[in-house]
Amino acid sequence: MLANPSSGRLHCAKPFHFHPKSNEPKCFVFRNWPPRSKSKSKFCSLSLLVPRKNRKAFGIRALTDATGAAAVDVTQPYSVKIPVGDRHILIETGHIGRQASASVTVTDGETIVYTSVCLADTPSEPSDFFPLSVHYQERFSAAGRTSGGFFKREGRAKDHEVLICRLIDRPLRPTMLNGFYHETQILSWVLSYDGLHSPDSLAVTAAGIAVALSEVPNTKTIAGVRIGLVGDRFIVNPTTKEMEDSELDLLLAGTDSAILMIEGYCDFLPEEKLLQAIEVGQDAVRAICNEVEALVKKCGKPKMFDAIKLPPPELYNHVEEIAGDELVRALQITHKIPRRKALLSLEGEVLTILTEKGYVSKDTALAGSETVPDIFEDEDEDEEVIVDGEVDEGDVHIKPTSRKSTPLFFSEVDVKLVFKEVTSKFLRRRIVEGGRRSDGRTPEGIRPINSRCGLLPRAHGSALFTRGETQSLAVVTLGDKQMAQRIDNLVGVDEWKRFYLQYTFPPSCVGEVGRNGAPSRREIGHGMLAERALEPILPCDDDFPYTVRVESTITESNGSSSMASVCGGCLALQDAGVPIKCSIVGIAMGLVLDTQEFGGDGSPLILSDITGSEDASGDMDFKVAGNEHGVTAFQMDIKVSGITLSVMRKALLQAKDGRKHIIAELLKCSPPPSGRLSKYAPLIHIMKVKPEKVNLIIGSGGKKVKSIIEETGVDAIDTQEDGILLQVKITARDLSSLEKSKAIIANLTMVPTVGDIYRNCEIKTIAPYGVFVEIAPGREGLCHISELSSDWLAKAEDAFKVGDHVDVKLIEVNEKGQLRLSRRALLPDADPENAGVRQPTGDSKDVPSQTSDKNKVKGTSSPKNNSSESTLLPQKKFIRRSVSPAKDRQNINNDATKKSSSRVVSSSSKDENTLVNGGANIG
């Protein structure tokens, strides 16, 4: 037999029994191992391995149970189908992960979630927090994908995976028994995902079933479901398609008799409708739990109740006797920091008495001394080993002495645990008996509220919201699509969030020193709750095409900081000029469930706007956000065995009254929100064009859009499909650059009409066969050499040069959108009879052919193709214009008399072309 004192576990090479007739397990771990001794030797006496009388074994899993019977074989595969909503889910155990304490797979459709539960062989140090860790991961292979990043292996948890970890953790903790300190780990993976059946509610149910089958001692089996609302019909575990039309997204977890956790989001749903949804969810959870109980009876492992270690019951009375009066005075301190320091000082005094000096009862200390015989040994004699029960009576003397009370000593961990519980008990008693809380409020009272906006001049929007000793600094930043948050999910479709809220809880907000790094799970969860609460009041993308980022930094905290983020975020959005639909506020509700213990009538006591101490000592933390008409987000955590619908109804109605009060206080904000865009915020303008015009904007390889950005100085130009038309979104820092880019894109995508006249247009390029004239910024057309003058020209450069300005008329638009222009048609001495005939270019191969020349002109598009077109187009050709001479004659005469019915575009400068008679059509 080998003993490892550091681990406290015995390793038996062979079956070993301390007593032949003992039914004890073959391996032991003792509660106080390693032994407490003044000796610094790393080896202990072998005699200490023998269990003392009445000493309980500190439980580890053994080969046999306490009665000596063989343990139940739980490795046999077993499966059961459980009805949930309009379909069944399949529960399987014993197939995968048989070395874990328990493992299950839950299947819904083709979505499969695997969950395992394991616990440490030896207990960790006792604490007031159950040592439970939850890890949830969505494998990309579940949907036949790999990660889109550089590393193809799944890394740290994504935000939505962290949120699901919290959904699993929160309902499990209230069911765990106090005093169990074996570290417990729950691992959950999505092994298959069909895109229809969400895995999050399955993961909650799988974790509850795995814990129920494992050795971890718990009180009840839990399960979780999602509830949707489509029309007037509640749906249990709706598919992703059904959720697209749902007004409610509620995830509920509980036992067969009570609710433990709810979290959900909706669009101003009335309280009564929300209660109906919770009732539907509770019925579904009850049905699952009843089926699981039968499964646990067949496959469950024996629970490790013998491993539970609780503080001595008498310690509670001792702590109350020592610190009772001081506790009452400390809990009457209004402010958080002085109250916390007073409680810490009092806890230190209690620790000194119970761990160092020793506890002596007041009654015992006042009692008189009694003379009794006392047995002692000679101190001068060396210690001898007694063999075979023989005692040398000469070494034992009897001396009369007075009896003194023996001080009682307790461990530091037990004293701290008991002191915290006693403090909570006194706080609850003060609220129930006196009807007043630590800060003097009634149960329905709301702390004083103060708010101000615009305190950060360079931020796009800012607000400081203060409620009692809880304070949130909310800052809004506006941006374009590039600022949106990309989400990589199992579906494989890129998802972009144009609104997100980030919550930060630094240690300084509670006056402490702590870690300051990556966001914690709590910060991610609180940020998502505030984000989903504010999301319903945001305008649609067409009305407000900005990406909105809200940062909520908690600068002071004494409870309900996430709901302060909702209030501060709403003010900051208004200060940034976001046209929100209405104001949204949030409030946190608390609960003292058993009031009869403190002299109450037994009915639950609901607390509005709870503080940090009331959250820690109370039985519920119920956060509700919305306005006076309905709820947008809610989250409830329970610290007892659960609450009923009647308690929830009372809490929701009381929360509604609290929200009305807070909304009225927000109207007193000074200075109030500006309600307009900051001068430092970017400007965004949306233009809608036909999809076939996008190439004119982007250009070859994006050259055109880059040149527009460089020329005008805008930040970005993005395109996005919007049904039939195409959205062109321009983001700029100033109005001048925005207007300039708008004009260029409008001219690029306009639909010119044959017969339109353009004045003062610049010649951009000269080719052997003609010139390219810019009729609008970025829009050019070809004026053939035959259309430049009424006289014959050998070369265009003989009469014109780049940069000259001319008046031209649009005489043709081919099927590619390319423009053919004529200057000759506008000359007053132009011969109407020859207006449709081009002059020869001097080439001996010139053959009059209308068809061939027409095809050549259609092939010209931009100055970028001048060199290629000059080689393809033959010289010296006579071609008839597509516009009839009669029509040209009419246009020329009308132009000469300045009574033209054509559209006339005048270009006063090379950068701006404005429409004189009517606006150009946007394609």
Image (spheres, rainbow, N blue to C red):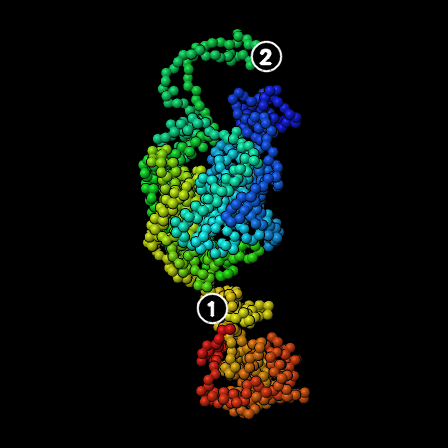
Return the residue nearer the eye: 294 or 223.
Answer: 294
Q: Which residue is mark 1?
A: 738
Residue 507 lies in quadrant: top left
Could you classify mark 2 by the number of other residues whose Cα lies within 10 Å: few (under 14), some (14-19), or many (20 or more)? few
Residue 842, x across and y down, in percent: 64, 88
From the viewer's perspective, is the residue at label 2 or at label 1 nearer? 2
Element type where label 2 sits in the image: loop
- Residue drawn at x 50%, y 30% is 309
Return the residue nearer the eye: 357 or 663.
Answer: 663
Return the residue nearer the eye: 97 or 561.
Answer: 97
- Residue drawn at x 38%, y 20% is 364
* Mark identifier at residue 552: none
Q: Which residue is mark 2?
A: 387
Observer able to see residue 422: yes
Residue 199, x across and y down, in percent: 54, 48
Residues at circles 2 and 1 in contact by the CB criterion of under 8 Å:
no
Element type where label 1 sits in the image: helix
Earlier along the polypeptide chain: callout 2 or callout 1? 2
- Residue drawn at x 48%, y 65% is 731
Residue 580 lies in quadrant: bottom left
